[in-house]
Amino acid sequence: MKMNEKGLTQEEVNQRISQGQVNDYVSDTSKSNKDIIYDNVFTLFNLLNVVIAICLALVGAYSNMFFMAIIILNVVIGVSQEIRAKNLVSQLSIVNEENVEVFRDNQKVGIPTTELVLDDVVILSAGQQVPSDMEILSGNVEVNESLLTGEADLIKKSAASQLMSGSYVTSGQCVAKVVHVGKDNYAIKIAEEAKIHKPVTSELVESIRKVAKFTSYIIIPLGVILFLEAYFLRQSDLKLSVVSSAAALLGMLPKGMVLLISIALATGVVKLTKKKVLVQDMHSIETLAHVDVLCLDKTGTITQGKMIVSEVVDVNQSLTELNTTNIMENYINATDDNNLTMQALRSYYQTSSNLNVLDALPFSSDRKWGAVLFEGVGCVYLGAPERLVSEDNLPKEVYQAQEQGSRVLLIGVDQTATQLTDTVGNVEVLSVLIIEDAIRENAEQTLAYLDSEGVALKVISGDNPVTVSNVARRAGLNHYEQYIDLSTIETEEEVKAIVDDYTVFGRVSPQQKKWLVEALRQKDHIVAMTGDGVNDILAMKEADCSIAMAEGDNATRQMANLVLLNSDFTTLPDVLFEGRRVVNNVTKVASIFFIKTIYSFLLSILCMISAVGFPFIPIQITLLDLAIEGYPTFFLSFESDKRKITTKFLPTALRRALPNALLVVINMLVIYFVSPKLGITGIDQTTLMYYMLIAVSAMAVIKACLPFNPLRLFLAVTTTVGTFVAAMLFKSLLEITWLNATTLPVFVVLVICSIIGKLILDKLITGKMGSFN
């Protein structure tokens, strides 16, 4: 043992522990439970509803506070879903605690990786993950750093070389000294950069925020004015003044809309979980439905991240007496090599021992070949073509395969060899082995579908651009030939200038991946990014929707919006379909919710100008929230709808709601001015107004159900009839009465006029009749 390999003494270990130089830091890039609760509870929308509820509670109007159940249910759904998803991701990260061998007090001891301290001397062998940044003191290893750099090629490391935490030793053995621990490790530093949580990218949520923001500007002054008018001008008592003002303000807030979005998205979460897609942020389902650029990592995303033998070509007709398959089955049985290439060969060939093995020479990164000496056959070589034979003797199949981006090995034989040496003998080429990184099943169909749906595809990889381009070709990606080596690009401005010009980006650093995503978003694209390694974290954090592979790095899983539990990106169309279902269905029924927002605002303005009381009370509005808005839209939101999203949610919803909202206002004005002349006053007038409100709102439900199918017809009938029945049954609570001989004819006439008026207004405002499109 060399002096610098003796390791630390226990006293030195204790000293480092006391200084906090221990490898026990765990990066948690996921939102804390506190953050999740805060984001779901402390919203402007919730605040406005709570303020109104407090005012009602202070005057004892408890029956008018039922609307808070909707707010509470919405918060519970959001919080429980996010915490559940976070806990599931945490479970993915729980693995058996790994141990490593270290030198301490001149002795080899095994300790958990979390107990490593700075300057510990560690023994690493093939198959182990590097637990901390280290410097090799002695030995030679090959390392896979794909999770950190994106490059699939194995990298040879020797004395004085740096090993990065998170990489894997694939062959060899070395003794290395720990140079960084905990949060100073390379992988942790990148993960920590992603800790700042980006805001939710959701058109639906943003639309609700816009409505809440607009309402916040007017709700306080309007509420104060309506209260003062009721209390001082109309001399109503305190409770009635608060209740009347609260009803006007509550109607402007689309509580049911918020709940419906949460339920529709939560339903999507459950359905996707059954398809092995874990949704950490349920609004990301909607975001993916709007995505127009998808950035894909190569290794582990388009490919399976493992090598396969795609073809074995026998090229020497003079060696027909040698059976390649039998030779390789014996070769695999004779060697201890276990790198990625050999794993592919072991999957392709069985093992055999019918040849007598005289000697074996393991594969070496320096030689680029390995060999086995068999009795009666000679020396069989397996390795890089250019290292086994001269360029002039290379078969054409080698060049053809290399041009296609495949990895090529030669199987050669020296029948005259009697012993093994480090130099190649007189090799005759027996066969050409063509090895490729396996394309995921259904990848071609998935890429073709996404392309047909207008989603631009970008492949971003740390690997060689030629190799990546050919992988993209094999996966059926359009424009695969448009590739660039980003190692030749240095500045952020240069990266942003060429982002639209290429489909395949190779030799991309983690920072450059982030620049690419930023550039795409700055061009008003909605960007999704897939990845599985630390090298993808910065870009995934910048993307509108981030998608991680379950087989990938722990930090990547924690911060992603979606985690593909089977690490198969071909499930993305399922997420796309769920997003479209939610957006299309919510957009289809949103007009039902925004009718109340519009007419509440218009009636409030009219009431303020005229000093007349708002015609409805909160409990009446709540019944419509449940019966007209909640019941039918809940079931309609489950319908399948894979249509491409072509409209903006808020303008479309408001435009479709406007005809019915105007009808409500017109009917209220007609009733207010005409009913006294017909002898309809007091509670009869209030009843007539409320029944017309139900009728006009039911028209919106009927329109949303067109064209009818059995479910939609059932919903249209039961909603209309059921709401009127509920109003009759709970007339005391709603502070209304029956329609009588005087009010019933007026109601029938107004309904008929409203139907005609709706057809006219629909044509004038939306340009369509009898359709929700």
Image (spheres, rainbow, N blue to C red):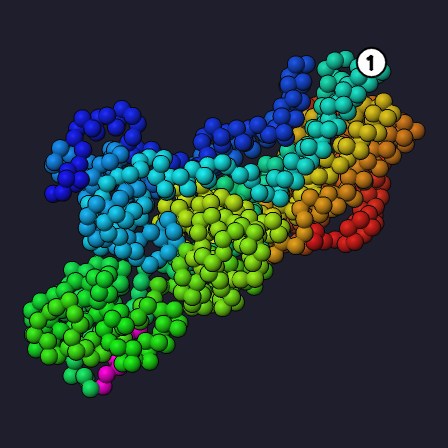
Q: Residues within 10 Å of mark 1 (few under 14, many from 20)?
A: few
Position of residue 359 relative to residue 159, above or below, is below
The residue depicted at 56 percent of the width and 33 percent of the height is 74
Quarter of the image for residue 409 reads bottom left
Please, what is the three-letter code of the amino acid marked with disc 1? Phe
Find out whether residue 312 is within the magenta segment: yes
Task: Give the camera-side residue of 176 and 223.
Answer: 176
The residue singled out by tag 1 in the image is: 232
Image point (47%, 45%), residue name: 538
Magenta part of the chain? 311-317
User: Which quadrant of the figure contains the N terminus?
Assistant: top left
Q: Is residue 131 above or below residue 504?
A: above
Where disc 1 sits, the SS reads: helix
Q: Tell me: 418 left or right of 726.
A: left
Magenta span contains residue 46: no
- Residue at image point 39% right, 73% down: 403
In the current view of this chain or complex, which residue is farthest to the bottom? 318
**Count of numbered marks:** 1
- Expressed as whole percent of the image width and height from the top left, the position of residue 369 reads 21, 67
Q: Residue at x 68, y 32 (%)?
A: 213
Q: Position of residue 335 (x, y in %)?
A: 15, 63
Displayed quadrant of residue 313: bottom left
